[in-house]
């Protein structure tokens, strides 16, 4: 394990041979497209060649598509991409909580790592400030967790 200039641990990303699935919500599409582009670039830079990328209407639909990919099988990790921006109603909390819980449930039910990069922000500028970094982070998390679970397999 290496450390970065910020003193944080960094794990080398070797995605060669991994099969990764991405589910991207279209709602707040400008942000989710940037998330997807950053994620795909990072995966390809790490050597991941087998990538399945699907889109769904919004964050609440992400878990259903993740579940379908998990049931299809053959994936080493999945990635959830979306953007939920606070509005004037309680709907933000409902969507943020339910989508997060559903993504976690799919990961646990299928014992499959899912990098959750569904942004939850107060406003569009916060989302724009996070879109590239969180897209890259999702790719790195997916690779790291896929490798970890491979090493823990009996």
Image (cartoon, helix red, strand yellow):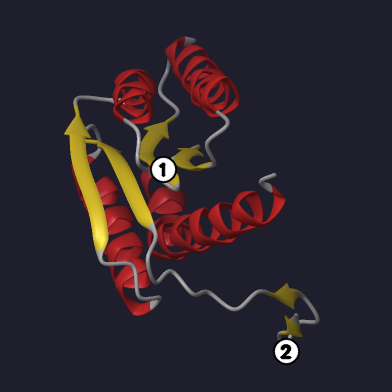
Q: Mark 1: give few (<14), some (14-19) or many (20+) Cα within 10 Å.
A: many
Which corner quadrant holds the N terminus?
A: bottom right
Name the residue at 49% across, 12% down: 94
For this orientation, the residue located farthest to the right is 7
On screen, residue 48 above or below 108: below
Please provide percent x and percent y for residue 80: 40, 39
> Is residue 89 among the parts visible in the rendering?
no
**Residue behind mark 1:** 78
Name the residue at 49% across, 10% down: 90
Which circle's residue, 2 or 1, is located before the other in the chain? 2
Mark carried by residue 151 = none
Q: Closer to the camera, 51 or 23?
A: 51
Secondary element at tag 1: strand
> Is residue 7 among the parts visible in the rendering?
yes
Please provide percent x and percent y for residue 44: 30, 72
**Residue behind mark 2:** 5
Q: Distance between the residues labelled 2 and 1?
A: 29 Å
Which corner quadrant holds the C terminus?
A: top right
Secondary element at tag 2: loop
Q: In which quarter of the image is residue 81?
A: top left
Name the residue at 65% across, 74% down: 11
In the rendered structure, the answer to whether residue 34 lies left or right of residue 81 reads left
Please provide percent x and percent y for residue 84: 40, 32
**Label total for image:** 2
In the rendered structure, the answer to whether residue 116 lies left or right of residue 81 reads right
């Amino acid at each position: 394990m290496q450390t970065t200039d910020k003193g944080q641990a960094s794990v080398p990303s070797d995605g060669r041979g991994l099969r990764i699935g991405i589910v991207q919500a279209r709602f707040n599409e400008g942000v989710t497209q940037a998330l997807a582009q950053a994620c795909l670039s990072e995966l390809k830079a790490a050597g991941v060649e087998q990538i399945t990328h699907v889109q769904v209407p919004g964050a609440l639909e992400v878990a259903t598509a993740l579940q379908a990919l998990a049931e299809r099988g053959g994936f080493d990790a999945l990635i959830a991409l979306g953007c939920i921006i606070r509005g004037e109603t309680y709907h933000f909390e409902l969507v943020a909580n339910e989508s997060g819980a559903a993504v976690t449930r799919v990961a646990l039910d299928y014992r499959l790592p899912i990098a959750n990069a569904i942004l939850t922000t107060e406003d569009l500028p916060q989302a724009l400030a996070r879109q590239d970094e969180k897209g890259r982070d999702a790719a790195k998390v997916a690779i790291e967790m896929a490798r970890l679970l491979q090493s823990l397999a009996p």
